[in-house]
Image: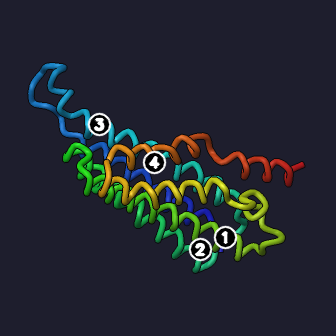
Amino acid sequence: MNKNRLEAFSDGVIAIIITIMVLELKVPHEPEFSALVEKLPTFLSYVVSFIYVGIYWNNHHHLLHTSKRVNGAILWANLHLLFWLSLLPFATGWMGENHFAPATTAFYGIILLFAALAFNILQIKIIKEHGKEESTLAKAVGSGIKEKISLSCYFVGIPLSYFVNQWFGIALFVLPAFMWFIPDRRIEREIMKEDE
């Protein structure tokens, strides 16, 4: 099965997710800069989520670039990822509107955790389809240290947000975004090796 349809569908869903998030930013009724201060938590949660969606879009593109074909398991794993990403606008809005309240921040972390798990499942399905020895993705990911660090940040950040202080959780949720901000060079390097 060709991967082009999967990639086009995923790009469309991700574009809609970003559109929904920006539509959640409500315009202040007062024509003063001070009115923007009240919207700052909503705007900041939007910025973090936009960065995350951008990271997923970039890495999803790289992920599919390593794939020569897709099967039913990959299609379902991809839908699983898109499901969790589609909940980001809701979690973003809830967290921003409630000024990063502990429960809303913990819920945001839960969405990030399940999106990361879904991405890892998609990686596993792609590697399985192409064979662990032949898979460009398997060679690129290696031990998956970045993936493990990200999951650890979410696992620790969720209870910290709710039970200790939401700002500790937010710091742990932002850390993986810094790590993943630059598209995954491991995949790029492996693809360049194969092209040579």
- Above or below for 184 versus 120: above
Whole-angstrom CA distance, mark 2 to mark 3, is 34 Å
- Rendered position, 43 above or below 100: above
Picture residue at 25% right of the left edge, 33% below the top: 40
Residue 172: which numbered mark, if any? 4
Q: Which mark is residue 74?
A: 2
- Between 46 and 14, the one nearer to me in the picture: 46
**Would residue 24 appear left or right of 55 to someone viewing this image?**
left
- Of marks 4 and 2, which one's residue comes earlier in the chain? 2
Amino acid under disc 2: Ile
Q: Are marks 1 and 2 in contact (CB under 8 Å)?
A: yes
Tag 4 secondary structure: helix
Q: Marks 4 and 2: CB-CB under 8 Å?
A: no
Q: Residue 83's spot in the image, x, y percent?
A: 41, 67
Label disc, if present, on residue 43 of the rendered structure: 3
SS label for mark 2? helix
Q: Residue furthest top?
A: 32
Residue 35 is situated, as x and y percent measured from the top left of the image, at 15, 26
Q: Nearer the viewer, residue 141 or 2?
A: 141
Q: Tell me the tag on residue 126.
A: 1
Q: Is residue 81 shown left or right of residue 93?
A: right
Pointer 4 local density, CA inside 10 Å: few below 14, some 14–19, many at least 20: many
Could you tell which of marks 2 and 3 lies nearer the N-terminus? 3
Identify the residue shown where x is 58% and y is 80%. Answer: 72
Which amino acid does the dot numbered 4 rest on? Leu
Across and down, in percent, residue 97 comes to 20, 45
Q: 6 left or right of 63? A: left
Q: Mark 1: give few (<14), some (14-19) or many (20+) Cα within 10 Å.
A: many
Q: Callout 1, which amino acid?
A: Ile
Q: CA distance from mark 1 to mark 2?
A: 6 Å
Label 3 close to label 1 by CB (< 8 Å): no
